[in-house]
Image (spheres, rainbow, N blue to C red):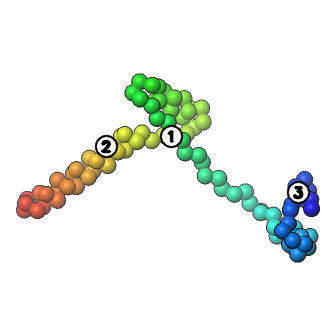
Amino acid sequence: MGVGEKLYNFASEIEQEKFKLNPEGFIPRTIANVIPPHILIAGIRGSGVATFLCLLEGKYGMSSIELKSKFLEILDRERKSRRHVRFLMKGY
């Protein structure tokens, strides 16, 4: 069965009759939100990953996260937290 320029298939004639009575009830009114893609770019030192990321950011307005710096931030935060706990346990 076709409505407008679209073709619809139905599992049975009962669903087809329901659609014929109220086609607007089956057609979404809003456009679904699409999650933007996540891209991982990896390479050895000196392979141009940072340059390629800068080009992508400039051309497509993307943002990037450098995992190494994020990982080091988390490690540093954990190290400071453990150091603080050790000081408290020693009574400082």
In the image, is 65 to the left or to the right of 35? Answer: left
Residue at 77% x, 63% y is 28
Q: Quadrant of the N terminus?
A: bottom right
Residue at 45% x, 31% y is 43
Query: Where does label 3 land, which residue?
Result: 7
- Look at the numbered disc 3 and give the secondary structure of its residue: strand
Give whichever of discs 2 and 3 has the lower sequence position.
3
Q: Residues within 10 Å of mark 2 (few under 14, many from 20)?
A: few
Q: Amino acid at mark 2?
A: Leu
- Look at the numbered disc 2 and give the secondary structure of its residue: helix
Please tell me whether mark 2 or mark 1 is closer to you in this view.
1
Where is 78 relative to 9, above or below?
Answer: above
In the image, is 6 to the left or to the right of 54? Answer: right
**Where is residue 41 drawn, in percent x and y?**
50, 36
Distance of label 1 from label 3 (alpha carbons): 38 Å
Query: Where does label 1 land, which residue?
Result: 40
Residue at 41% x, 29% y is 44
